[in-house]
Image: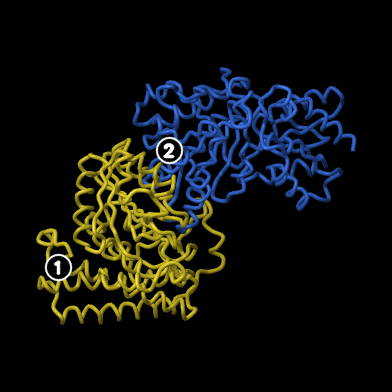
Chain colours: A blue, B yellow
Amino acid sequence: MPEITLIEGIRQAMDEELARDERVFIVGEDVGRRGGVFRATQGLYEKYGPERVIDSPLAELSIVGVGIGAALYGMRPICEIQFADFIHPAFNQIVNEAAKMCYRSNGEWTAPMVIRAPYGGGIGGGLYHSQSVEAFFAHVPGLKVVVPSNPYDAKGLLKAAVRDPNPVLYLEPKKGYRLIRGAVPEDEEVLVPIGKARVSREGRDLSLFAYGMMHHYSLQAAQQVAAEGIEVEVVDLRTLNPLDRETVLGSVRKTGKALIVYEDNLTGGYGAEIAALLAEQAFTDLDAPVRRLAGPDVPAVPYSRPLQDWFMPNAEKIAAAIRELDAY
Amino acid sequence: MVVTGTEAKLKKETLREIYWIMLLARRLDERAWVLHRQGKIAFHISGIGHEAAQVGAAFALRRGHDWVLPYYRDLAMTLALGLTAREFALGLMGKKGEPSSGGRQMPSHWSLRRANVVSHSSPVATQTSHAAGIGLAIKMRGDDAVVLTSVGEGSTSQGEWYEGVNWAAVHRLPVIFFVENNRFAISVPQEHQMAVENAADKAAGLGLPGVTVDGLDPLQVYQAVAAAAARARAGEGPTLVEARVFRMTPHSSDDDDRTYRTREDVEAMKARDPLGSFREFLRSQSVLSAEVVAEMEAQAKQQVEQAVAFAEAAPYPEVSEAAHPVYVEDVHHA
């Protein structure tokens, strides 16, 4: 099985879905001739033409709004937001329009579409090329939110998202685009179901919940502490909404301890939802307080290298948090 | 009233139908205000004074084939597209079977799938980019439908609106951007909304034709929208059509327009009521007789009575319906 990068998994998924279903098209800034600023759509403009790989005006809300309109008519748009930091002008379209369409029309109208957005820090992107936006959107019923952490899931979740009848926000851990490599079969259809977490490392001492780039670091940290005799169970959440509660609860019922790692700001971040779930439904299984390791509560990731390093969780910080929780 | 010559092309039957829908919309709207004062409904947002523009625009489309993304003042337009009086009354009361949302949305938040009328929300102009997206999909598929989306003039201040219109202009999409300019966005007058004289002047900066017509005359609006639809169908791209209308009532049942405009201003508007002037025009053309006018009034009254009685007797949705359908997977129609 060939090893590919995470971004190649994304590119392959779009290529295959464009080939499979003529209703699928891509729209976003620089996705055409340029092949995307991260090259996620490289080669697709040449292969499928300017009518299916559309360079949009530099205006995010209408990338999503036009996508919604096309979806209402029966198309299956993939809308690219160049950086998650730029998604905020489209918040109204995503939250008030796409996510509410099915409910507000009592199922008469639906918006089957994918909104892709690279997110996360550690790449020298400063305040506006580093943001993690998942908590805003995972709060919204009617929208599905997925975050892959490896090339296989990147490909399989994106293909599943394109086929999903609902709007799906697909957040891409951009630091991992070329850093994270993995085997992805060439000759078989890769589909990863939305709504299913994955236990990516089994362990008995504590449960570590993460997604995206933080999942990658969490596996590294788990390996570090394994040498010290701490067996961490790592759960890759993969889908933030709808959350796979069973897998989360099942893991904590086994280990009795929970650490949640995310690179968004701590307060009101996605980890709070996991913590609340555990407090409500696994209280008597817990042997220690639920712990969150996240970005600090400053507005966003600073640019200067040491300041950025201070902000970002990494394998060392995660290992330290694991040791502390293990010792409780 | 400016006579344009269009009436010669419309059959008498069609002219009567235009008048009938304007009349029915007016009587339903008036009843909604009464129902609100009686405490029977929580909210009403009125289209009184806009009927001529709305029905003229709707009749210029291939109704049921073309796509329409209206806004909350478009009762007359939505009736022209196929909404029934009963359905409107069900919507006012949030009763079961209400077709736009099953009682989830406030009244006058239109959606009628069977007539290609697309669901819209309350934040204004958000449907503009949807119209562009539908236009894009029509173009991609090679279909011959066109799209009409409407807003008030205040909504043309929104970035939402500019982005959607710009998209359609760049891609020459088959979209008609219809602006019902009643000169007030709730209380804010047009001169605090835009520096141009007409909302249609904005089209020049976006690269599409813009026309302003008298929205008190359904035939002028019909002609302008028909021309825009023909352009769109011929692949020549979008058009901005502005209809100058009056909002003869407060913004909604929660507004009091005495706080921001004089009674004299409102009386002057009512003196130019498009329902009355179109009726008189049709009478002068021998399209309507006094007997037919009286008959139509009686019929409208009866339809309104029956619709309200039907809605009052109709059940509310089951409480369990409120939990669905969040996702397509739990769509289950009764």
Up the image or down, B30 lies above or below B58; here it is below
Tell me residue A262's x, y (percent): 70, 35
Residue B95 is at least partly visible in this image: no
Tell me residue B5's x, y (percent): 11, 59
Quadrant of the rendered image containing residue B231: top left
Q: Say which element carries label 2.
A: strand
Which residue is depicted at the point 46% across and 44% down? A112
The C terminus of chain B is located in which quarter?
Answer: bottom left
Report, in whole angstroms, how far the alpha carbon at label 1 lies from the one at label 2. 43 Å
User: What amino acid does circle 2 point to?
Assistant: Pro
Label 2 CA crowd tier, 10 Å (few <14, some 14–19, many 20+): many
Q: Is residue B115 left or right of residue A155?
A: left
Residue behind mark 1: B13
Up the image or down, B334 lies above or below B120; here it is below
User: Between residues B68 and B263, which one lies in front from this camera angle?
Assistant: B263
Farthest right residue in view: A327
Q: Is residue A54 left or right of residue B319?
A: left
The N terminus of chain B is located in which quarter?
Answer: bottom left
Which residue is depicted at the point 27% across and 69% down? B22
Label 1 CA crowd tier, 10 Å (few <14, some 14–19, many 20+): few
Q: Are marks 1 and 2 in contact (CB under 8 Å)?
A: no
User: Between residues B302 and A16, which one lies in front from this camera angle?
Assistant: B302
Tell me residue A321's x, y (percent): 82, 32
Which residue is depicted at the point 74% across and 36% down? A296
Residue B107 is at least partly visible in this image: yes
User: Between residues B63 and B296, which one lies in front from this camera angle?
Assistant: B296
Q: Chain of mark 1?
A: B
Residue behind mark 2: A77
